[in-house]
Image: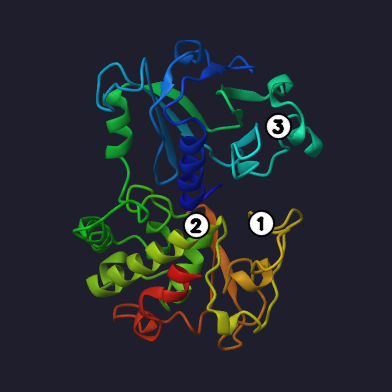
Amino acid sequence: MPEGHTVHRLAAALERSFGGQRVRASSPQGRFSDAAELDGLVLLGAEAVGKHLFLPLAPSADVAADSPVVLHVHIHLGLYGSWTFAGDPGFADAHAIGAPRLRVGEQEEAVGADWRRLVPRPTVRLRLAGPSGLADLTGPATCEVLDAVGRQAVLDRLGPDPLRPDPDGAGRRRFAERVRRSRTTIGALLMNQQVIAGIGNIYRAEALFRARLDPQVPGTDLSAFLLEDLWEDLVALLAYGARTGRIVTTEPEHRDLEARILERSRGTRQNGDEDAGVVPREKSFYVYHRQTLPCRLCGTTVRSQDLAARTVFWCPRCQRVRSRRSNWTREHPAAAWALSS
């Protein structure tokens, strides 16, 4: 399932591609009947909140975003959803965002063809087309049209998103307070989108390792200082992911230590894997998909087990923190590498 940084990248790509433009909307698959209601409207922008995407459309570009005439397309990609793009040169800076999919037109070479003649695959739930290109949505868990009240109801169910502006620290404090009120393990709470929005299995495992934090410790046992440090580290990690399209959590000096990973049959695919100079998967993570391998820092065997319906990975020696403040952020202030890489 795409993590929060991917949805923020998707929102930026859609806004750059269609923002302020009148779009044609259709549902080649036929399962999104509301597409006809959207056809011919102007896309006002795109908004990401955690793993949720909102596309506001209105009769004209001068309509206020909070106007009652605005229709909000709410999309959650889930495990299998993705967007694919095709268009004029420079139309989109990504061919596909989300779960691995064939590109628009089903063949790689089709991307360079005349995009106006590309026939959508029968699995396309929603196609948006503008003057310079198109985007196809396939396999989403949710694709629906909401009014302003419905959009707000979705937002009210979500915890704070580390990638959204938080100038006064309200999101950071809200996260810490919600965790400290719960006896649930921190490993489970990080996957609860009502506690913190946008965190998936990779960020969970890696952020807990970077905090030296035991995944099994109850939220009530953790200090506000430790949790606010954890939040700030996630802000830096997700910001790097939103900027590059890649999850990289290892410090540069650790990447060549035990540079191995246990790939699944399809592997842990990231954007730009084929590009020269990117950090390869086997150097990107401390513990994710490294069960049974030695910890990069201490050599202890990395362990894994099911937690909150997903597999959590951790080092039983490094991750001993239970209630005191983690030393990680003092040793690596503000995760400066992530903000500047």
At 59% across and 23% down in the image, what residue appears?
127
Residue lying at the far front of the rendered structure:
89
Q: Is residue 225 left or right of residue 9?
A: left
SS assignment at label 1? loop
Identified by mark 3, the residue type is Val
Vertical relation: 333 (above or below) 206: below
At 31% across and 26% down in the image, what residue appears?
150
Q: Earlier in the sequence, mark 2 or mark 3?
A: 3
Identified by mark 1, the residue type is Gly
Label 1 environment density (alpha carbons within 10 Å; few <14, some 14–19, many ≥20) = some
Task: Please state which of residues 112 and 231 is positioned toward the viewer in this rendering.
Answer: 112
Judging by the rendered image, the residue that carries numbered circle 1 is: 272
Q: Position of residue 45 (x, y in %)?
A: 40, 33
Q: Earlier in the sequence, mark 3 or mark 1?
A: 3
Label 2 environment density (alpha carbons within 10 Å; few <14, some 14–19, many ≥20) = some
Judging by the rendered image, the residue that carries numbered circle 3 is: 104
